[in-house]
Amino acid sequence: MAKDGRNLDDLVHGYHSKGEAAIAQTLAGNERPFVYQPSLDLRLQKYTGKGKIPRNPNFRVGDVVIEYIGKPDDKDYMKTIVYKKQMYEKEGLRVVYISRDDIFDKDKG
């Protein structure tokens, strides 16, 4: 259940999670054009030595990237988030991070 009372069980279609579906619905409801999982070519030579590596953030709204942090208790997942933060910072991208606690009531999942 979203904090605003929406039931999100049926909204996941087309998204990887209820959280992503809730973000998409909020953006669309506020008439904010967005791209879901846009392709970004990030220059990562200093991180990987492999040049440009395609990355897909969850959303892009204009020049802002939105990343949903859906598994904050998963250590491997959070390592990926830390790595992405480093990449985005290095690229000078404006990023908004949204956690599941920002969207969902803890008691109602």
Image (cartoon, grey):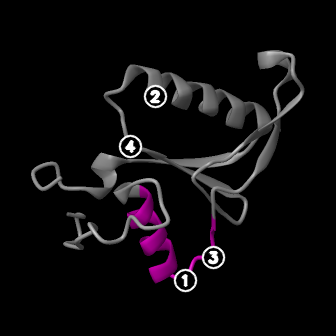
Q: Is residue 8 above or below residue 33?
A: above
The image's mark for residue 77 is 2
Image quadrant in which you'd find residue 47 = top right
What are the residue bounds of the magenta stretch? 20-35
Residue 70's tag is: 4
Image depth: mark 1 or mark 4 in front: 4
Q: Secondary structure at mark 1?
A: loop
Quick check: 20 left or right of 81? Answer: left
Measure how far apart labels 2 and 4 are at the Cα level: 9 Å
Q: Quick one: 52 or 62, which is closer to the camera?
A: 52
| Residue type at the position of mark 4 | Gly
Which mark, by number, is residue 33? 3
Measure how far apart labels 1 and 2 are at the Cα level. 31 Å
Question: Measuring 70% from the left and 57% from the top, which residue is drawn there?
Answer: 38
Mark 1–mark 4 distance (CA, rounded to whole Å): 24 Å
Q: Quadrant of the N terminus?
A: bottom left
Element under disc 4: loop
